[in-house]
Image: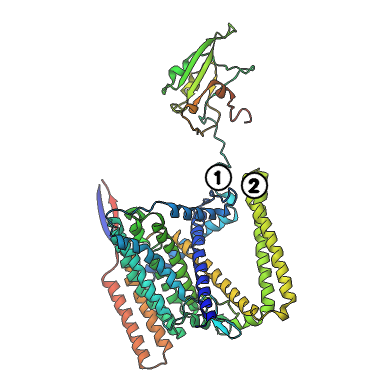
Amino acid sequence: MSLKVERVQGDRGVESFYLWNVVQGLAVTVRHAVTNLRAPRAVQTTNYPEEKKVMPPGYRGKHRLVPRPDGSPKCTACMMCATVCPARCINIEAGEHPDPTIEKFPVQFDIDLLKCVFCGYCVEACPVDAIRMDSGVYTFAEFNRSDFVAHKEQLLATLSQWAEPR
Amino acid sequence: MSAIGYVAVIARAVLALIVLLSFVPFTVWLERKGAAFMQDRPGPNRAALFGTFRLAGMAHVLADVVKLLTKEDIIPTEVYGTYYRLAPMIAAMVPLMTFAIIPLADDLAIGHFSTPLSVLRIPGGLLWFFAITSLAVYGVVFAGWASASKYSLLGGLRSSAQLISYEISMALAVIGTILVFGTVQPNDIVRDQGHLLFGWLPQWGFVVQPVACILFLVAAFAEINRVPFDLAEGEAELVAGYHTEYSGMRFGLFFMAEYMALVTSGAVAITLFFGGWQIPWVPTAALVAGAGIGLPAMLLVGALGLAGAGHWLWGWYRFYRERDDWRAKEPRILATGAVAGVIVCLGLAGLTFVDRASLPLWVPPVFALVAQLSAFVIKLLIFCWIFVWVRWTLPRFRYDQLMNLGWKGLLPVALLNLLVTAAIAMPMGVLSWVALGVAAAIIVVWYLASRHAPQARLRSSQSGS
């Protein structure tokens, strides 16, 4: 491939002042300005802290533990999620469940949100649909590192953005 | 000078400063908000005074001022100290001094007392404007050279070449206006623009000197280093140009100077080409004589404006209240204030209308002053908008394009305009023919030059592999 440079004739005479072109450009910008001035709410920008966007379904936000009807976690502490997790951010301590048909339950279920890469593998791996990432929460801000570790109670209390009203 | 004379000098200096300096934050706000609306975004609206008053983003400007004043002022080690410190002062001084010759209203005459409404009235008149604006280049060059930085130096060099080139066309354009009005006194020029052409058209500068008007405006954009001619701070290649090495309030002074220069050149353009303080079709004498009717009418217009603003604010209040938004508080308070303002305006209008036959002696002249000052300020607002509008429409020129436009475009046109104006303005005689002959010669030379040295553009095209 070669570059060919050709000399072309530039604008001449009155055209070289670009006056008409300038007027055309000004018309375009003022049209936008007037439209937005008349309907400021039509601007696409979301005024963030006051208005929050609802995340689309499938958005992987902060995790939550799905509760049973009695409020305890569905989780059976099978360690599938902790095993598949590429960031190793899930820490489960299993305990014996009083109900022999359930066998185990998590005494402790911690997710370090600073380590988490939000890949969603834990959700895919779970055999009992106990962990989901459908809370729609994407803002994490805390004053301490330790506060970024989400504990079992907190994960249980988090609600889905879509299934139930928040 | 009598004691009252000194008071008058100080008072009009203060008035000019108030007009100029209150326009600076306003223009900054207009620039940011105007740019935002042209680019389909809401613009600054976060900062809030006392957590409530966002003033449609104007609180950001106040926050910026506080930030600039309290920021650390870093002076790099290698700079040439004196000139480095001098440069922002010169930059800020020039537009302030230029504004001194702008007449903000017609002369105020109460009884035997009379004062002009410009800070300075000197025999030189507009020559003051030329003299002082030429100094602007020193601020830029000192900053560029004394910063001991390559970016600053390049920005300063570009800017000085540009300022000097466009100053010539600007001066020639203004000389055409001076020829038409036959005086260099700004106030006399403005007064002359009050005359009517053909009995109905105000004889404003852009009517009698349309070419000079366009030339002046284009040159003014270049003179204040504004887009599309802001090569001095081409941020893509020069970081920030001549003020790269400045920080804190020293940078703030450059920033303010830029906007003061904008307001000042707008004021000069208004004075020369858009009737200055003239209200179209209403001369000063009519304003003074009709103050009894004019004052209540003005207050009524004010009340109407406030009512419109209140209605608009109330709409916002309802919009936010429906959403249970904390932002509902501000429009509610402001709308209440607007309603109070409407009541006060209506009351004053009624009082002055009842007393219109027995107004105190000082009221009619002061009313004329306020009305003309308002006309001037409204024109200035429109000009600020035009400067903002053009900035966010046009892309920046390339350096050779800038020089081509200045020397090969504007300068010949300015010369032609001057010569033709001179030929028409002078009593027809030998000199008129000489002027027209020179004009014809310029056209011939211009045509030949453009034929033999075509402004070639390079276009690269890709051909097969």
Q: Crowding at label 1, few (<14), some or many (≥20) Cα neighbours within 10 Å?
A: few
Say which amino acid is labelled 1: Asn
Residue B80, image x, y percentages: 28, 60
- How crowded pointer 2 is (Cα within 10 Å; few <14, some 14-19, many 20+) is rated as some
B145 relative to B353, above or below? above
Decide: marks 1, 2 in contact (CB < 8 A)?
Answer: no
Type of residue at label 2?
Answer: Tyr
Check disc 1 and report its element: helix, strand or loop: loop
Which residue is painted at 50% across and 34% down in the image?
A141
C-alpha separation, residue under disc 1 versus residue under disc 2: 13 Å
Determine the chain carrying the residue at label 2.
Answer: B
Q: Nearer the viewer, residue B349 or B387?
A: B349
Mark 2 element type: helix
Res. B128 mark: none
Q: Which residue is mark 2?
A: B320
Q: Farthest residue toward the top?
A: A100
Residue B291 appears in the rendering: yes
Q: Is residue B151 left or right of residue B58?
A: left
| Front residue (pair B116, B155) | B116
* Residue found 38% across the figure and 60% down from its top: B396
Extreme-bottom residue of the structure: B429
Check the residue under mark 1 and report the chain it is in.
A
Q: Quadrant of residue B334?
A: bottom right
Counting from the top left corner in percent of width and height, residue A127 is at 52, 16
Q: Nearer the viewer, residue B256 or B195?
A: B256
Q: Is residue B376 left or right of residue B73?
A: right
Residue receiving disc 1: A47
Tell if the residue under mark 1 belongs to the same chain as the one under mark 2: no
Q: Is residue A102 above or below residue B399?
A: above
Using the image as rendered, state which of residue A116 and residue B421 is in the foreground.
Answer: A116
- Furthest residue toward front: B3
